[in-house]
Amino acid sequence: MMMSESIERKEQPAARLIRMEGVKKIFRTPAGSFPALRGIDLDFAEGDFVSIVGKSGSGKSTLINVLTGIDRPTAGTITIRETEIHRLGESQMARWRGRNMGIVFQFYQLLPTLSLLENVILPMDFGDVYAPAEREERAMQLLELVGMADYAHKMPAAVSGGQQQSTAIARALANDPPILLTDEPTGNLDSRSAERVFDIFQSLSEKGKTIIFVTHDDSLAARAVRQVRLADGLVLDDTQRRPREGQRS
């Protein structure tokens, strides 16, 4: 009976985690208005592994920025679990983001005056999810996860770009957020380093993290479970490429 119930649970659709409804983003410039997003309707489920692709100017980075709260939508709603994040104030958004999202940037954004270990600990100091006595051990575990434990006490400038990006992923996981959002995370990496970073994302997805990543690399994008293609601020295509872990094909 218990085995039957377990199989039944695995075959149920994944719970919806993120809903975007009618999301628009218009940038006002001296030259006029530019609609970066023109009415996006998208849902993301728990455990989704999604690539966001499209030509330059299609709205990929803007989509990530409104999901993280870095930018606010001009119109529409963004609901993550029960929270309408576009309605949060700046300080509320910062606290909410620190506990619910990990963000990985193209240019790593590691603090150059801190060791790799200290960079990973820093979000825990702000998020206050883990007790101070637990933070260093957790940071070391995360560096181990991304293959960087042997370099924990080195400064960012002393390691390669791929190693810095691996550390940035560890930092993004510091407070164990359910969602990992990335914008061109392999854009500055050689093919071998890019492969290593992608493998980390794949492993995290298999552990239940929701991964949404913008990429210009079609070969990496094609390996995601789901691919969303944007064009001129609209969803051109949304394809489930293969079943999520634990679902029937």
Image (cartoon, grey):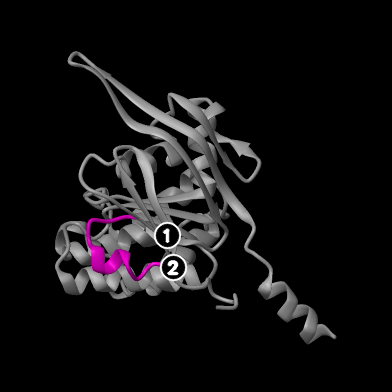
Q: Mark 2: give few (<14), some (14-19) or many (20+) Cα within 10 Å.
A: many
- Magenta stretch holds residue 154: no
Is residue 220 found left or right of 7 in the rendered image? left
- Is residue 143 among the parts visible in the rendering? no
Segment colored magenta:
214-225
> What residue do we see at 25% from left, 73% from top?
195
Q: Position of residue 230 (x, y in %)?
A: 33, 47
Q: Residue furthest top?
A: 30
Which dot marks residue 225? 2
Q: Secondary structure at mark 1?
A: strand
Label 1 neighbourhood size at 10 Å, few (<14), some (14-19), many (20+)?
many
Residue at the location (29% across, 50% down)? 105
Marks 2 and 1, how far apart at CA: 6 Å
- Residue depicted at x 40% and y 71%: 202
Looking at the image, residue 198 lies above or below residue 33: below
Residue 117 in sight here: yes
Location of residue 208 by image quarter: bottom right
Depth order, front residue of 149/108: 108
- The residue labelled by disc 1 is 50
For mark 2, give the secondary structure: loop
Q: Quadrant of the N terminus?
A: bottom right
Residue shown at 42% from the left, 36% from the top: 66
Mark 2 belongs to which amino acid? Val
**Mark linked to residue 224:** none
- Residue farthest along the front direction in this orientation: 236
Question: Quick one: quadrant of the C terminus?
Answer: bottom right
